[in-house]
Image: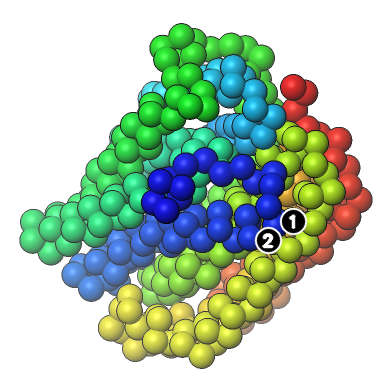
Amino acid sequence: MLKSLNAPTDMTVGTPWKSIALFTLPMLIGNIAQQLYSTVDSIVVGKYIGDNALAAVGSAMPILNMLLVLFVGISAGASIMVSQYFGAKNRESLSVTIGNCITVTLVACIALILIATPFIRPILIFLNTPESILDWCADYLMISLVGIAGMAFYNILSGIIRGMGDSFSALVYLLVATVINIVLDIYFVATLKMGVPGVALATVIAQFVSSVLCLIKLSKMNEFFDFGLKYLKPVSSYVKTVIRLGLPSGLTQAIMSSAMIIVQSLTNQFGEQFIAANVVIMRVDGFAMMPNFSFGMALTTYAGQNVGAGLYDRVIKGAKQGTLMAVLCSTVITVAILIFGKWLMGIFTDTASLVDMSYSLMKILAAGYIAMAVTQSLSGIMRGAGDTMTPMWISLISTVAIRVPVAYGISYLTRTPEMPNGIKECIQISLLASWVLGAVFTAIFYSRGKWKTKAIKQ
């Protein structure tokens, strides 16, 4: 049983919904474990340091996400290529793809550290980061940037492993790293009194552990591909394909991170408590989104393998069943947030006013998770088939053309002498609007079916 879970899965056979569900479950647990990284960070700093430290970690996250967009793109491109070559049983192309992705990731890590390091503090100042949390934000980002290779290689290597249908191994490695992260968080902050930098250091060390475990796993999968030094030499056609497929996904993440940074500037104007409230919301939101992201990634692999095998009718059938499962999960989560949300907020802080504010704002977002189930599922199908451009454009429209103008528009129109920056709810209302309209756009473009013409040529 354990051996079968730990092996690649051929998703071109069997009942579609069962294949999707069995692949999604370990990945869902893994995504929840990965979300625990940032959640434990927030709980530890909120309980042991204070609400200002909680705000500092929250203000740093949009910038850190922006720094990681390059690796999101590489991971997406790698996963699509691996799933299609695995589905087509093309051993040589699979071997070259994996080796080239490792090389590209290493070069990108070095370049990012050299280029981004000098700009950390100027960016924080530009975004109106409150003086009281500026140093903490800068320390958190600098440590995360120096250790970014661990985060990058885990994302890339786990994406490759999932592309071959093995979501269980990545889960095991991530659970090990999560335990390490929790232990080190408490040790560095509660025992050594390292403050916010201790939280960043704990996360970096844990991510390195998970990436090393993934690399060891890949080195032993010689039944399906060859893993040697000669495959690390860049082959231009493969690198270009990774970039072509991954760039839209990376740009999508960049667009979302840019929108978050722009809105973060508005958020910062409402003060430290509101920033802290948004950190609490983001942590709960991270868990609420996990089923959507998990189904989206599962459907990317499912579509990739079946497109590689030429089974388009099976792709469409799986899309319907997978989307339905995602919607049902999100509906349950939405109800749970409405019932237990206030208790969830209390996990992060003992400040009653902060709990009340966080819960009030969270209720605005609740229904949006159902809309995101549709977006993530159908976008996963399109990406797996090789159409990464359409989800990028939809993300561009929903986050830049809808979310940012709505947030600033509501803020401007609701200004009063008592509320010079307008109502705080503008942040959550704008996010809900972007989620709902994004789901509508995604459903329309999926139904048009142009994604069926985007497969990689074998």
| Nearer to the camera, 440 or 277 | 440
Residue at 78% in and 32% down:
455
Secondary structure of the residue carrying numbered label 1: helix
In the rendered structure, the answer to whether residue 279 lies left or right of residue 337 reads left
Q: Is residue 37 left or right of residue 305?
A: left
Quarter of the picture holding the C terminus: top right
Choose the circle earlier in sequence order: 2 or 1: 2
**Residue 309 in sight from this viewpoint:** yes
Dot 2 corresponds to which residue? 17
Choose top left, top right, bottom left or bottom right for residue 452.
top right
Kindly report the distance in space between the C-alpha atoms of the residues bearing marks 2 and 1: 6 Å
Tag 2 and tag 1, C-beta contact below 8 Å: yes
Residue 379: image location, x then y, percent: 72, 51
Residue at the limit of the structure toward the front, as seen here: 1
143 or 212, nearer to the observer: 212
What is the crowding at mark 2: few (fewer than 14 residues within 10 Å), some, or many (at least 20)? some
Residue 318: which disc? 1
Amino acid type assigned to the residue bearing label 2 in the image: Trp
- Which amino acid, by three-letter code, is at mark 1? Gly
**Residue pictured at 73% horizontal, 34% vertical:** 308
Residue at image location 20% in from the left, 68% down from the top = 49
State the scheme by which the image is colored: rainbow
- Image coords of residue 223 (percent x, y): 48, 27
